[in-house]
């Protein structure tokens, strides 16, 4: 089966800055493909002809995005990170206008608009001007506009960034439903957990190069030695995190809400020592789990991010 995207030697310079450094990857037809990396590199803009490649080739279902732009764009829908709706138009009119831009016939675009507004819970608000919409409603409408031409490939740029819980859940459900219908999804996100539970494969880009590309579970096996214990106590006090860090076989401790995550290469011995610590300090564990590495752990390891160092630099 033909790939939805083939990126060959993809390169982008911004003046003297090499933002994308001769990368190669493919997106298989029918998969949800996640791209984790810094903003500003122009990944989606390069693949959709919104910015010119410095070097290399990008193909959409076999069609070169630079030399066969019109044909390639017929396959795709694009949802930018910043909502591109017109505030003085109603939700319905925004969809009608976008449908005309995509050259969707009147009967078809009206049918699609109704389906999409129903899907995103916006049909009852279709006649209202969108200037009164919440950020989540505007985001849902923006995605609807990217789907008006019934694309085979959907580019989603940070689709749930900064949204309320309801809008986030609706968007995630729609993405899964679209994919089940055969739509290929190219997703850029900073929400690593979202990528882990949503994507079939994930590419991690660092300093313009692809550091790794695979399924989330296979990526986690890269650092299988990094495991952790997650514990919550009936008491939470500032001293606990310092004391947990002194437990033998515990390499690092992070506070995550009302829980503590203890990183270790030896879960058995760390657990035994944790239990002794709890007993000697009259602490009652209310929950305790052993965890393998997360996709966030992989991202941190592969991109060599030192959070504490970065925080110190910011505060200096």
Image (spheres, rainbow, N blue to C red):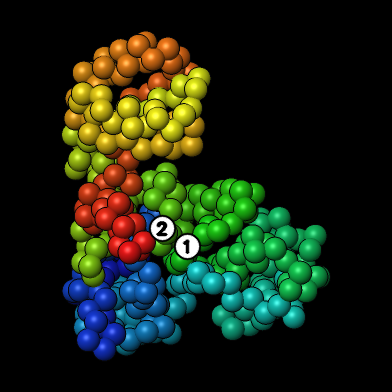
194 on left or right of 305: right
Residue 57 image-quadrant placement? bottom left
Helix, strand or loop status at disc 2: loop
Q: Quadrant for the C terminus, please.
A: bottom left
Q: Quadrant for the N terminus, please.
A: bottom left
Give me the residue at 22% from left, 34% from top: 251
In this rendering, is residue 73 above or below 295? below
Residue 18: x percent and y percent?
22, 79
Task: Please tell me which residue lies in front, 203 or 298.
Answer: 298
- Foreground label between 2 and 1: 2
Q: Are marks 2 and 1 in contact (CB under 8 Å)?
A: yes
Give me the residue at 40% from left, 62% from top: 188
Residue 13: x percent and y percent?
25, 83
User: Could one spot residue 8 in this view of the protein?
Assistant: no
Helix, strand or loop status at disc 1: loop
Label 1 Cα crowd, 10 Å radius (few <14 / some 14-19 / many 20+): some
152 on left or right of 17: right
Residue 7: x percent and y percent?
26, 71
Task: Please tell me which residue lies in front, 51 or 58.
Answer: 51
Which numbered disc, 2 or 1, marks the residue that appears first in the sequence?
A: 1
Q: Which residue is mark 1?
A: 158
Residue 42 image-quadrant placement? bottom left
Q: Which residue is mark 2?
A: 190
Task: Please tell me which residue lies in front, 122 or 65.
Answer: 122
């Amino acid at each position: 089966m033909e790939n939805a995207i083939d990126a060959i030697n993809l390169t982008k310079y911004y003046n003297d800055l090499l933002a994308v450094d001769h990368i190669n990857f493919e997106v298989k037809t029918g998969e949800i493909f996640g791209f984790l990396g810094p903003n500003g590199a122009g990944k989606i803009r390069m693949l959709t002809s919104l910015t010119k490649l410095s070097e290399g080739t990008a193909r959409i279902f076999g069609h070169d995005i630079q030399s066969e732009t019109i044909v390639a764009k017929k396959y795709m829908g694009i949802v930018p990170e910043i909502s591109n709706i017109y505030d003085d138009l109603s939700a319905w009119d925004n969809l009608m206008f976008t449908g005309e831009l995509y050259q969707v016939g009147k009967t078809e675009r009206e049918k699609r608009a109704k389906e999409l507004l129903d899907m995103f819970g916006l049909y009852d608000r279709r006649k209202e001007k969108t200037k009164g919409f919440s950020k989540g409603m505007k985001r849902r409408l923006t995605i609807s506009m990217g789907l008006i031409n019934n694309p085979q490939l959907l580019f989603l740029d940070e689709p749930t960034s900064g949204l309320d819980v309801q809008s986030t859940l609706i968007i995630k459900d729609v993405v899964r439903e679209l994919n089940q219908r055969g739509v290929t999804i190219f997703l850029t996100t900073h929400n690593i957990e979202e990528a882990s539970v949503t994507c079939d494969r994930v590419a991690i880009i660092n300093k313009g190069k692809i550091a790794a590309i695979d399924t989330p579970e296979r990526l986690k096996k890269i650092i299988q030695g990094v495991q952790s214990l997650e514990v919550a106590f009936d008491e939470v006090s500032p001293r606990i995190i310092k004391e947990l860090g002194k437990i033998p076989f515990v390499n690092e401790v992070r506070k995550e809400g009302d829980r503590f995550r203890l990183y270790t290469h030896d879960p058995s011995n760390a657990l035994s020592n944790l239990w002794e610590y709890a007993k000697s300090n009259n602490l009652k564990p209310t929950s305790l789990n052993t965890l393998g590495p997360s996709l966030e752990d992989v991202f941190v390891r592969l991109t060599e991010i030192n959070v504490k160092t970065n925080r110190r630099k910011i505060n200096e």
